Image: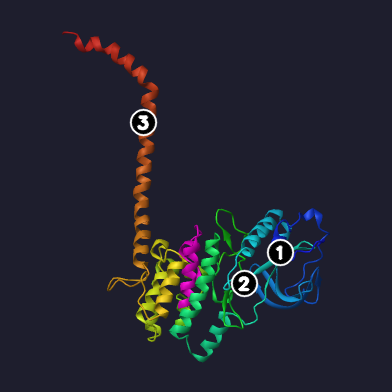
Amino acid sequence: MTTPRPTGVSALVGMVPPPAAEAPAPARPAAGGLQGQEWDDFAIGELVGVGGMGEVYRAQQRSMARTVALKVLPAAVGDDPLLAQRFANEARAAAALASPHVVAVHACGRHQGRCWISMEFVAGGTLAGLLDRRRAERRPCTPPEAIAFALQAARGLAAAHAAGLVHRDIKPGNLMLAADGRLLVADFGLVKVAGQESLTLTGSTLGTPLYMAPEQARGEGVDARSDLYALGCVLYELLTLRPPFAGDSAEVLVFQHNYAEPELPRALNPDVPQDLQAVVLKCLQKEPAERFADAASLIADLERLGAGLAPRSAVFAPGRIGTGAAEALRRRAGRRRLWPWALAALALLAAGAALWWRWDAHKDELAAVRRRVAPLAQAQP
């Protein structure tokens, strides 16, 4: 990239030049093939992660004498000026976040046609790694551990949502564990900026089916409550060592998220308190309007649980605990039953409209005929 080098949040503005200004791109490297390369201010080290929105490398930023995580996006982003600009806009929005529970974005740019983003390097693994170890030990998180993890993630999401950002891919692999014990929300690769189109690639999956909110799985609009649903899935897994739903295909998972009840956490882990189970199920409501209204409401209930108090928002009537699957199925069945009636009504309306048009088109002619036959009706034999 040409100088000056991007070295901070302010450098994100305008740091994605049009492809015409770039040198011809070399052959695309294989996954992990950037190790050892020099990209402007960065010396690229080992590959530390691969996802649908690119590869992440440990890198040294020489000008700042610091270790960073350098995310290199798929070639399709750099090849499309519109996608590249959207990437810059969304990276700029993520960089504006200031929270101890969000991985900081430092800068973004392009190198020989490849878009990159420089982020805080978190040397502590992910919640996914912790869950793998706990599964091997058959030892779920204790309720206080799970509450602490969910509380930190919710605080990170609260900061993002306050800035108009929806993450759309909350899962254990995107929740980083720092050496100092902090949990940080990472990878805003699918982030949606309120009021804007989101950076997506043709054919790519938006989100991860194991943790995807029903409305997101249906391809409908998402908002902050969609992130809270996904966080509820993570909290369920921390307590039970399994996600709320399992299936051998994305289609099966989509159906379950929309129309199936998960097994109650207490049925899988009797150590889960009733009140914590209620918070989990409040997050997992099928209808967004039935979930926590925002991250602040979830934080308030988690803090109350941590203090030994009952939740205020996650309250269910006796015998009514669940996520609303039966109601969702009834609504779906009702819509399906209404289709034949709706089609019949449309057919009748179309027929009526045609008859009216014919009558309107010939009403003058009919009036003339009536005037001619009127004397005949009055004639005497």
* Quarter holding residue 112: bottom right
Residue 364, position in %: x, y?
36, 17
Q: Residue furthest left?
A: 381
| Residue 223 included in the magenta stretch of the image | yes
Q: Which mark is residue 355?
A: 3
Quarter of the N terminus within the rendering: bottom right
Of mark 3 and mark 2, the one earlier in the sequence is 2
Of mark 2 and mark 1, the one earlier in the sequence is 2
The local crowd at label 1, few if under 14, some if 14 to 19, many if 20 or more residues have their Cα within 10 Å, is: many
How far is mark 3 from mark 2, CA to CA? 66 Å
Image: magenta residue range: 210-235
Closest to the observer: 344 or 377?
A: 344
Residue under circle 2?
A: 103
SS label for mark 1: strand
Residue at point 40%, 63% (across, down): 287
The local crowd at label 2, few if under 14, some if 14 to 19, many if 20 or more residues have their Cα within 10 Å, is: many
Q: Is residue 241 visible?
A: no
Quarter of the C terminus within the rendering: top left
Residue 136, position in %: x, y?
53, 89
Position above or below: 129 against 328: below
SS label for mark 3: helix
SS label for mark 2: loop
Residue under circle 1?
A: 108
